[in-house]
């Protein structure tokens, strides 16, 4: 099976520059439906499902190899190679923001720039770093997910989305979580929440936009500030919205921020 089939890769639009959108944990490429179409007239847009998510080949999800985020980064590079993309911009949400950064570290000659939407290289509070969770709280979140994934999904989605239990973003996120294979979700969720990729962030050598939410229960603004200081060529843009999913709760602001950044980068080339 080709990587295009494995990851349900779809391409739209036209233009010399390519945007590759990578969704977050428990989601699929449909999460970009409010943002990606805005770029189709001026860019080639690539959407895909992470291995183990959406309409990807679930049998390709090897628990041992996908126990590290670097494997998802390898998938991104494989997709870029298969489509013969030249210096695309990777747009990744949450954990995929970090794997997009890892892809840029692994293949800096193949990646043009990275847009990180609500990134967090480490969710755990550390000395001189505020990730958002103390160890006991993070372990409680993971234990709940392991014991009752569907219950976890229903309870956590409103917190992650930030628009209340009946909000459209929360409903969309809950439905997405519940469509995900529970065993894969439990495994990938643990990998997502326990990974610490702070050391790798300083190795990103391509222009990087960090889109941070002003009120994010998962990634406080201190994370975005740390990322801006750590990534050599980074720009921080804080979007005035609640939650961890600005592409769902504030799509217009997200589109504007990405478009403005791409325009500046294009002018500087």
Image (spheres, rainbow, N blue to C red):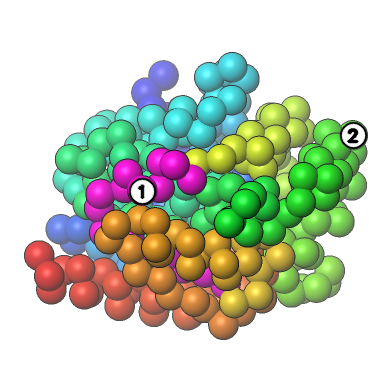
Tell me, for residue 111, which label it has, or none. none
- Whether residue 67 appears in magenta in the rendering, the answer is no
Magenta segment, which residues? 198-213
Q: Indicate the secondary structure of the residue bearing disc 2.
A: helix
Whether residue 29 is situated above or below residue 35 in the rendered picture: above
Name the side, left or right, on which 163 lies relative to 188: right
Whether residue 25 is situated above or below residue 167 in the rendered picture: above
Mark 1 surroundings within 10 Å by alpha-carbon count, few (fewer than 14), some (14 through 19), many (20 or more): some
Quarter location, residue 262:
bottom left
1 or 2: tag closer to the N-terminus: 2
Quarter location, residue 67:
top right
Residue at numbered disc 1: 202
Residue at numbered disc 2: 147
Q: Nearer the viewer, residue 222 or 99?
A: 222
Looking at the rendered image, the quarter that the N terminus falls into is: top left
Q: Indicate the secondary structure of the residue bearing disc 1.
A: loop
Mark 2 surroundings within 10 Å by alpha-carbon count, few (fewer than 14), some (14 through 19), many (20 or more): few
Residue 184 in the image: state x and y as whole percent: 69, 30
Q: Nearer the viewer, mark 1 or mark 2?
A: 1
CA–CA distance in space, label 1 to label 2: 36 Å
Residue 132 in the image: state x and y as whole percent: 69, 58
């Amino acid at each position: 099976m080709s990587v295009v089939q494995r990851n349900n890769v779809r391409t739209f639009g036209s233009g010399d520059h390519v945007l590759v959108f990578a969704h977050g944990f428990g989601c699929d490429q449909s999460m970009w439906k409010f943002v990606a179409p805005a770029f189709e007239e001026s860019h080639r847009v690539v959407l895909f499902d992470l291995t183990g998510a959406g309409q990807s080949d679930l049998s390709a999800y090897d628990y041992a190899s996908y126990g590290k985020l670097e494997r998802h980064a390898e998938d991104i590079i494989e997709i870029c190679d298969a489509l013969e993309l030249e210096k695309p911009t990777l747009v990744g949400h949450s954990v995929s923001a970090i794997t997009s950064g890892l892809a840029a570290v692994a293949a800096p000659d193949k990646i043009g720039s990275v847009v990180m939407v609500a990134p967090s290289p480490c969710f755990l509070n550390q000395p001189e770093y505020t990730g958002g969770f103390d160890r006991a709280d993070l372990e409680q979140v993971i234990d709940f997910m392991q014991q009752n994934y569907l219950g976890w999904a229903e309870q956590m989605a409103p917190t992650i989305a930030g628009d209340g239990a009946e909000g459209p973003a929360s409903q969309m996120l809950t439905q997405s979580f519940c469509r995900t294979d529970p065993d894969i979700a439990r495994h990938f969720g643990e990998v997502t929440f326990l990974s610490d990729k702070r050391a790798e962030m300083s190795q990103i050598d391509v222009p990087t936009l960090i889109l941070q939410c002003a009120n994010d229960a998962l990634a406080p603004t201190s994370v975005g500030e740390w990322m801006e200081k750590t990534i050599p060529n980074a720009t921080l843009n804080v979007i005035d919205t609640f939650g961890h999913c600005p592409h769902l709760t504030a799509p217009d602001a997200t589109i504007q921020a990405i478009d403005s950044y791409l325009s500046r980068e294009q002018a500087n080339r």
